[in-house]
Amino acid sequence: MASYGDSDVVNRDAFRQAVVNTLERRLFYVPSFKIYGGVAGLYDYGPPGCAVKSNVLAFWRQHFVLEENMLEVDCPCVTPEIVLKASGHVDKFTDLMVKDEKTGTCFRADHLLKDFCKDQLEKDINVTADKAAELKHVLAVLDDLSAEELGEKIREYGIVAPDTKNPLSDPYPFNLMFQTSIGPSGLSPGFMRPETAQGIFVNFKDLFYYNGNKLPFAAAQIGQAFRNEISPRQGLLRVREFTLAEIEHFVDSDDKSHPKFCEVSNLEFLMFPREKQVSGQPAKRLRLGEAVSKGIVNNETLGYFIGRVYLFLTCLGIDKDRLRFRQHLANEMAHYAADCWDAEIECSYGWIECVGIADRSAYDLRAHTDKSGVALVAHEKFSEPKEVEKLVIAPVKKELGLTFKGDQRMVCEALEVMSEKEAMEMRANLESKGEAEFHVCTLAKDVTIKKNMVTISKEKKKEHQRVFVPSVIEPSFGIGRIIYCLYEHSFYTRPSKTGDEQLNVFRFPPLVAPIKCTVFPLVQNQQYEEVAKHIAQILTAAGISYKIDMTGTSIGKRYARTDELGVPFAITVDATSSVTIRERDSKVQIRVNVEEVASVVKEVTEGHSTWNDMLSKYHNPSALDDE
């Protein structure tokens, strides 16, 4: 049995090609519009691919939406410009791009630098220890490099266009959103959403009311998202249209504890804190409870979702030894974020970010409050009135209008929704310097506020409730990336009975297998075929997916065909009252009565029993050679 592990570059590429060839030949996925030459970054899922994706999403709903009692929504893909202006996507949703100065072909600057460093480390036998350490450091901080630093490295290493060897331009930002217009006039600009989250944020007020005006609560959404990638590559890992499953967990920023954290606190897995990345140290196994108590992970709620993501991925069939949680470097994190971690899965392309888990603080709701004028806030009622010191921010609209003219309203609204910390820092600067720098997110720039433009004070008053903007913890799942990594982690080969060829197998857990079982008569025989049809009816009634094969092909070849689809169980009709059920990976068979077939398959595929349980129950395992 052979599978991909720590192999050299040649073996890794050969392994990847074997996986991709099998996936495309068996129609798990294929390039879209193939008869017209295809379009980079667009793929069609075939029947088994659709089934795997459907099973992954069904388990996601069970593991997160049902388990955590989340509120599921479904919002449009087409999004008005004003929404994405407020969120910052219009101004900042960019990748750094370079162009071939002669042909105009575009490339992602960080990808070219990453490929150069990896090639040097893997293929250049003359690279010195010092140079290797430098290249590893560049890879470690790649996401932390500015446009200027990226350009400097590209020039320093003499990196040129991959195909033409022409010189490259300096890196510059390229917005990744697909632009469109809403309606025939062209006067209402919009974009295809780059994420599903904004639909949840703009509905916060209604969702909070639906939830009985109580925190914490989570909303979830599964849907398509769109990113106009500069140079799509790596198959399903970097595409222009893809499925996201996102959760927005709204919580009081003063209390980010989680009542169920104890359920995951003893989990231990690979973690890669930013300090280890910057110092060039490897990831290490940490207990989640320890990571939270030491402040490596910012809070319990963030830690709880990291633990739940770990359980989700490993239950799907992701190898726990090739899964790590990497903390974002300082320059990767937005200024408002409290902490961010990525679940990264190792495959033949290296470590791939598949899930992002971020504590985004209160930024998103504040930004939409600022832009829309609708207060997206939560209320906590007191059992009896409390005397509190209340922050009062009073913008002087006349003075703001004289300075900022048409931008006066946005500056005014941004001042009014400042946090207490921001406001008190501004007051101190206004009193000491007479002015303060202030970032207005809806203008995407800093402005100078003078002392005569705003009054900031604190007043004591009795209040019956506390009004605040909740923080949000956001786990975001790239479903296509998870599925591709699952394909690689599940793929292996084994020799045929004669030993003259290697047979491909996907060892999908029954939970995600595209088809749960196959049914075929041992030989072409009318009685056996009638039994097979009867079993098919029983399986259909039980809601179990199956594939029936009445061809006269040898039983070994039929087993091999279904193993290549990752089907966990094969039901062979070799009698009229009982049949054998063969398990894919062990190739061990048990004999059961025809009427029991569906219940046996259902129990194991739904996780109520294991195959070993069935071996014990039907203590007649047969070592029949199935090839």
Image: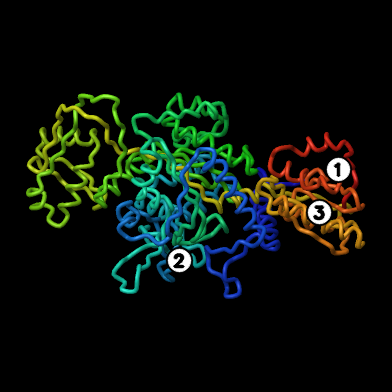
Q: Of helix, strand and loop, which one carries label 2?
A: loop
Labels 2, 3: front one: 3
Residue 208: percent from the left, percent from the top? 37, 42
Q: CA distance from mark 1 to mark 2?
A: 64 Å
Tell me the element at label 1.
strand
Examine the rendered structure and indicate whether residue 425 appears above or below residue 183.
above
Position of 170 compared to 429: left or right?
right
Residue 536, x across and y down, in percent = 78, 56
Query: Disc 1 designates what residue?
Result: 590
Residue 260 percent location from the top left of the image: 50, 29
Extreme residue in the bottom direction: 36
Q: Are marks 1 and 3 in contact (CB under 8 Å)?
A: no
- Dot 3 crowding, Cα within 10 Å, few <14, some 14–19, many 20+: many
- Which image quarter holds the N terminus? top right
Of callouts 1 and 3, the N-terminal one: 3
Q: Let me know if residue 142 appears in the view.
A: yes
Residue at the (56%, 45%) spot, across then down: 60
Q: At 87% from the left edge and 49% from the top edge, which residue is drawn?
A: 579
Tell me the number on the disc at residue 166. 2
Q: Which residue is mark 3?
A: 535
Q: Position of residue 252 (x, y in %)?
A: 35, 33
- The amino acid beneath tag 3 is Ile
- Tell me the quarter of the picture where residue 530 sits: bottom right
In the figure, 336 relative to 627: above or below? above
